[in-house]
Image (tube, rainbow, N blue to C red):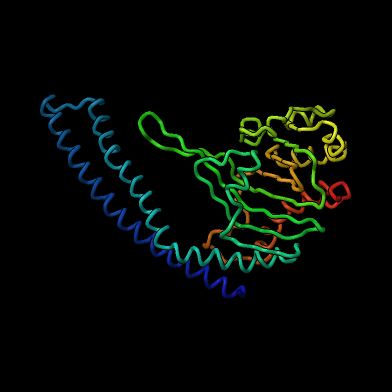
Amino acid sequence: MTFEELEKTRQIYYEKRKKIWTRVGVVVGVIAIFVAISTIVSAKNRLDTMEEISLGTTSSAGLFSVFMSIMMGVVPFVLFAFVVGIIVATLSTRKESSAYTRAYKAYFVSKTLSRYFQNLTYKHDAGLSRETLRSTGMVDTGDRYGSNDFVSGKYKNVNFAQADLHIEEEHTDSDGDTTYATLFYGRWMIFEFPKKFSFRLAISGKSTGSVLALRRRNDDKIHKFKRIKVESPEFNKMFKLYSEDGFETFYLLDPALIEDIQELGEKNNGKIVMLFVDNKLHIGFNNHNDAFEPPSPKKPLDEATETAKVEKDIKVVTDFVNKLNLSSKVFEK
């Protein structure tokens, strides 16, 4: 994939989208004018009838009623037509949109990832399995679960895997209307070490927007989790800490690591959950952001800008390795 090929793919997508939107706009506009004229004619007939009844005088309440009838006739249709237009335009350009996304990720994302990580595997249309997340007990996997942009590799001798997550919970009201609430929307990272932890330690940021599920599951080991606190009041204010073994926990959570986790929490508004289990560290970053996504096709791509954007998304992974010093002897056998 060359930059010229990527640009050609972007232009094809943009031109077709523009053409579809133009057609949809004309159709919606013509129908909206027809509905508006019909509504005005109907309102005028009502107004004439009111004038006859009131001997040629029309009250302000009557005029307001006529105005509202026009608005209620036109506005809902325009909104409905706009939504239909979005759906039509999206479906009509799905093939071109997918081609643009694949080309962008092949050129910018894969190319940039390969400069940072060894043993790289990148699959833009694959993700972490639902069972992988469910087994941690750290987040509710909801009613709708989506994951993409799977990356695995090695950084500073630390093996890792990561992907974007979007988890939603379904809600149905008394009228039967269904809506979806976001439980988690962001990044999930799994770091693997030579050392196997003899206990489980869970750290839940109080601003994650998700509920720590560890203590609610029917698992004898999970029920051994106890809420503990460290000496740092600032850390205790930002995070909830659960562990199976207080002595081992404080061996791992030395003052330096506590300070590093706190700094990461402050940098990311506390929207972090962490779990040390077996020989892995799971980190959920609930930042409501989808990584490695292409920009709108309206403007030509700028190589420097897009490369910097991808590097910023990559930095989320490298920051945790660097800041928490995950390549240190603490995490070795």
In this view, the residue farthest toward the front is 220
Q: Quadrant of residue 236?
A: top right
Q: Quadrant of residue 67?
A: top left
Choose between 244 and 141: the one closer to the eye.
244
Q: Position of residue 296 (x, y in %)?
A: 54, 59
Q: Position of residue 68 (x, y in %)?
A: 28, 33
Q: Give the residue at x 60% y 64%.
A: 105
55 with respect to 312 (left or right) = left
Q: Give the residue at x 25% y 35%.
A: 69
Q: Quadrant of residue 271?
A: top right
Q: Considering only vertical position in the picture, is 194 above or below 249?
A: below
User: In which quadrant will I find the N terminus?
Assistant: bottom right
Q: Position of residue 223 (x, y in %)?
A: 68, 30
210 with respect to 319 (left or right) = left
Q: Give the residue at x 61% y 62%.
A: 123
4 with respect to 277 (left or right) = left
Q: Give the residue at x 53% y 66%.
A: 100
Choose between 238 and 79: the one closer to the eye.
238
